[in-house]
Image: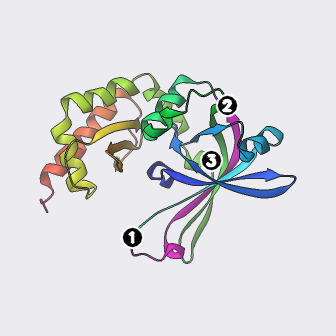
Amino acid sequence: MLLRRCERGALATLLSGAPYASLVLLAADLDGSPLLLLSDLAQATRNLKADLRASILVSATETGRDPLDSPRLTLLGRVQATSEPRHRQRYLARQPQSALYADFGDFHFYRMAVERAHYVGGFGKIAWIEAADLLTADSAQGLAGAEAVLAEWINRERRAELDLCVNRLAGRGGAGWQVTGIDPDGIDLRRADDIARLDFAAPAPTDEAFRAAFADLAAAAHRAPAD
């Protein structure tokens, strides 16, 4: 999903019945639902307290490509506060700079319950997508308890393979990439201020399936030609 690759987006809420858009930093839950960290002082938060309905626009940032011919996704749903520890962990792993203010009294984590989405893949490539066809809700729960263990397993025991996968399969250079989040569809990574994503060929909804999917990525990276 495009959202899993994006760090920021435009959050549109309702202000006296009119659209109000603001820039937000994003993370994704295991099933792909957007996670946010918002201040009570922000106008968008005040809007949500009056009406939970909102939309979030994310877009690909491909250098040198016409933005209007690039993929973008608008998610529609309801945004509510969450105290789920996993949501906090996933968000701060994706947005580590937010740890500076995440514990301030006026900041809270939020999650969008996605209802549907509008996808534009470029000129003439347009579709509405229902939440059931967009999210990986059914398979995500199998990884919920194993997320931290699997991320630590790759970061500690498979670091060389991870760098190779990012270099050869994602086309991103350098060493020292770290897993910041996992989900049934793939792996989120960070190296300093740079982010990357490795997608699986098929959903991996359990600990065993995830480890097998990562082994498949590593095998593919070994086969791929070096730049």
Residues in magenta, as a range: 63-82
The answer to whether residue 17 is left or right of residue 120 is right
Compared across the picture, whether 78 is left or right of 124 comes to right
Would residue 139 be seen by someone viewing this image from the given angle? no
Q: Work out whether mark 1 precedes mark 2 in sequence or the reverse, and give the earlier one.
A: 1
Relative depth, front residue between 60 and 216: 60
* Discs 1, 2 touching: Cβ within 8 Å: no
Q: Is residue 101 visible?
A: yes
Image height of 87 relative to 220, above or below: above
Q: Quadrant of the C terminus?
A: bottom left
Residue 150, image x and y in percent?
A: 32, 28
In the figure, is residue 144 to the left or right of 197?
right
Please give the label number shown on residue 131. Answer: 3
Residue type, mark 3 in image: Ala
Rendered image quadrant of residue 62: bottom left
> Disc 2 marks which residue?
106
Q: Residue at x 50, y 75 (%)?
A: 69
Q: CA distance from mark 1 to mark 2?
A: 36 Å
* Magenta stretch holds residue 69: yes
Q: Amino acid at mark 2?
A: Asp
Front of the two marks 1 and 2: 2
Q: Residue at x 49, y 70 (%)?
A: 70
